[in-house]
Structure formats: C-alpha cells, structure tokens
C-alpha cells in the first residue's frame, strides 16, 4: 500500500490531506460517503473495518502518525457548484465538520492550483463536507496565501444554562450545533483554567460532560440525526474584551478525549452562536478566540441571520501552513500492520 499526502497545520492543529492511494468511498453525497466509511453497525468513533478505514488507521497511528493527527480524504463534491468534497477523520473515526481542516483545504486548493487565485485578492473555494456546503475565502497578497476565512453551515443554539452534574459539581452548559455538536462551559465553573499544565484534568472534565449529555434532547440535531451527539466540549476562560469585541481562551476536547491544538474552527462557530444568543456579540463585532497554545482565530456573526431561519451564519478566520508532502508505505511483512496508538 502506497498513500500520498500533503500536510498542513492550522493554528497548530495538523491536517493531513490524502491526495493519492486511498480507495474510493461509495455514496451519492459526502454525507452518504461518510455513512459508508463508518460501515453498517459501526459508529463515528468506532468505524467498521474496511479498505478506506485501513488507510485512516495507517495515517493516524504510530509510527506514521500519532493520536492527535487529523486529516481528510478527498472525494467528489455533491454537484458541480462545489470544487471538492472531503471526509474528515481523526484517531477515533469520522467527524461531520472540521473548521481548521476547511481552512487548510482552502489554502491547499489554491496552493496546488486546483482553484485559480489572484496574486492579490481573494479566491473562494466551495467544499462539500458531511454537514453541508462551506466556503473558504483564501486571502492573497504578493502571490502568497496570507489567511483563510471560512463561512460555516448555520449554527443553532439548542440549550443555554443546561445543568450537568459532574464530579466537580453541577455546571451550566450551553449546546450549539455548528456542523457538529458542541457543549461549552467556563473552565472556572469546574475549578480549572485553560492552561497546558492542566490538560489531563481538562480532558477528563470534557469527557465527563460529553458522557453526561449523551441522552440529552439538546444534542439531537433539529434536522439531520446523523449530526447528533456531542462531538466536542469547549472549556473556556474569559479574557479582557478587545476593541472589536469579546476575547476568550479555550481548549476543545473532541471525539474520545482528543485535544484540539487550534482554537477549533467549527467550535468557534458554535461559540459565536452562543455569544450572539447571550447578547454579547452583535453583527460587526468579532470574537478573538485563543487556543491552549496561544494561536488565534477570529470569528464574527453575519448580519441578517440564516435565510432559512435555522440559526446564525458565522465566519471564522485563521491561517494554514504546509508542513510536508509524504508517501507512506505499508510493507506486507510489517507485523505492526497499520500501527498502534498509545
């Protein structure tokens, strides 16, 4: 098996784009292809083994990857209006959304020449993801990509101040659907703060909150049941407001206890929806969203709301940088096979 990838990082979070060697994914849409990749009887965090999933395992497990690796399989778009489709994956399976991956894909589509772009100005890359169609506006100056703004699917708040019992006491949680379902809670409510030295405690708290919400009606998507269930728990600190709006530092615990090194793109979209619902963020204002390693996304709520009335429309801006191009090999005599996780 030979698999070719182009790797990026977006605000510190990796994104491995599979450009060759992966088998095709059956289905008539990106959402259907994700369902096929998961397989009958499988789940988003426990896919049924198959040829495509063997490639995911190869790239996300040691010795070729690591437990924090993230990436995507390129697949056909749902129709000719989009430039590409993608199946997002991580160590535990397949996600319905990935904002940092969307930013990286926008940069790659322009950098690779898939989508034509001016030396100075903006190119728009339309991407079909399992939760719908998103647009990455790739900003250019002097022939270089300087940043990417992605417009997400509508974000909907399904609960505010929802009591959740934890081993650290009962906390009030907000839940929002922004391509994936996120629960957010102030870290201080758990007696914590967003610091790298507290990551074990933050991870444990995030997993506990996710499990506690498993049967809550708030985590059911209002339209598409495939988008239901808590994907990420956002624990955040309040920072001093800036001239453009609020500022927060967060760590997002996603899937089965993974830590997002970036401020989390679709999670930022969820936070924007909650802040707007709380009256803390008006159209034209910006959220400065900092990660646990100090990298930053900025986000905003667009005026007018979702034309279909399903929530708010958000945009998130960040940067992505290419880190390498790789050809991975699976030697048939390698007794470790697709690798291992620690």
Image (cartoon, rainbow, N blue to C red):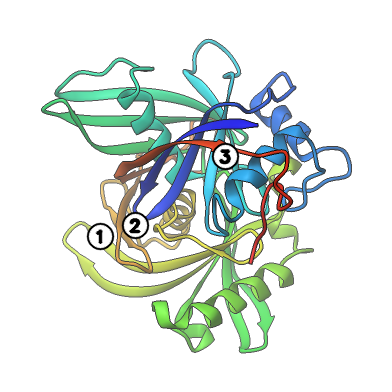
- CB under 8 Å between callouts 2 and 1? yes
Distance between the alpha carbons at the discs numbered 3 and 1: 24 Å
On the question of residue 180 being in view, the answer is no
Quickly name the residue at label 2.
Answer: 281
Q: In terms of secondary structure, where does tag 3 sit?
A: loop
Residue 116 image label: none
Quickly name the residue at label 1.
Answer: 245
Quickly name the residue at label 3.
Answer: 310
Q: Residue 228: x percent and y percent? A: 71, 49
Identify which residue is drawn at 48% across, 54% down: 267
Which residue, as the protein is rendered here, is positioned at the far right? Answer: 41
Identify which residue is drawn at 54% across, 80% down: 200
Q: Residue 211: x percent and y percent? A: 72, 69
Q: Residues within 10 Å of mark 1 (few under 14, many from 20)?
A: some
Distance between the alpha carbons at the discs numbered 2 and 1: 7 Å
Q: Residue 121: x percent and y percent? A: 18, 24
On the question of residue 165 being in view, the answer is yes
Residue 330 located left or right of residue 287: right
- Please determine whether, in this image, residue 243 is positioned above or below residue 119: below
């Amino acid at each position: 098996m030979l698999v070719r990838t182009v790797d990026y990082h977006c605000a510190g979070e990796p994104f491995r784009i599979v450009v060759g060697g992966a088998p095709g994914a059956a289905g008539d849409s990106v959402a259907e292809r994700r369902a096929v990749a998961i397989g009958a009887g499988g789940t988003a965090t426990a896919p049924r083994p198959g040829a495509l999933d063997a490639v995911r395992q190869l790239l996300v497990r040691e010795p070729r990857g690591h437990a924090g690796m993230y990436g995507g399989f390129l697949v056909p778009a749902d129709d000719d209006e989009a430039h590409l489709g993608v199946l997002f994956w991580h160590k535990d399976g397949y996600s319905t959304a990935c904002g940092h991956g969307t930013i990286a894909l926008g940069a790659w589509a322009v950098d690779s020449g898939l989508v034509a772009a001016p030396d100075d100005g903006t190119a728009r890359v339309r991407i079909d993801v399992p939760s719908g169609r998103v647009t990455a506006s790739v900003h250019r100056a002097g022939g270089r990509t300087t940043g990417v703004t992605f417009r997400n699917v509508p974000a909907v708040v399904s609960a505010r101040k929802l009591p959740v019992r934890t081993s650290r006491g009962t906390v009030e949680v907000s839940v929002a659907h922004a391509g994936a379902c996120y629960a957010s809670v102030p870290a201080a409510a758990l007696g914590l703060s967003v610091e790298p030295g507290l990551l074990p405690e933050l991870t444990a708290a995030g997993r506990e909150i996710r499990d506690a919400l498993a049967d809550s009606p708030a985590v059911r998507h209002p339209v598409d049941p495939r988008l239901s269930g808590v994907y990420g728990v956002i624990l955040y600190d309040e920072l001093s407001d800036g001239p453009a709006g609020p500022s927060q530092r967060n760590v997002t615990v996603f899937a089965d206890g993974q830590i997002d090194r970036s401020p989390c793109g679709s999670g930022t979209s969820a936070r924007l929806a909650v802040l707007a619902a709380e009256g803390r963020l008006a159209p034209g204002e910006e959220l400065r969203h900092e990660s646990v390693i100090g990298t930053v996304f900025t986000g905003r709520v667009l005026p007018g709301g979702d034309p279909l009335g399903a929530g708010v429309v958000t945009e998130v801006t960040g940067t992505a940088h290419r880190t390498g191009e790789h050809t991975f090999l699976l030697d048939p005599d390698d007794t470790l096979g697709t690798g291992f996780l620690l």
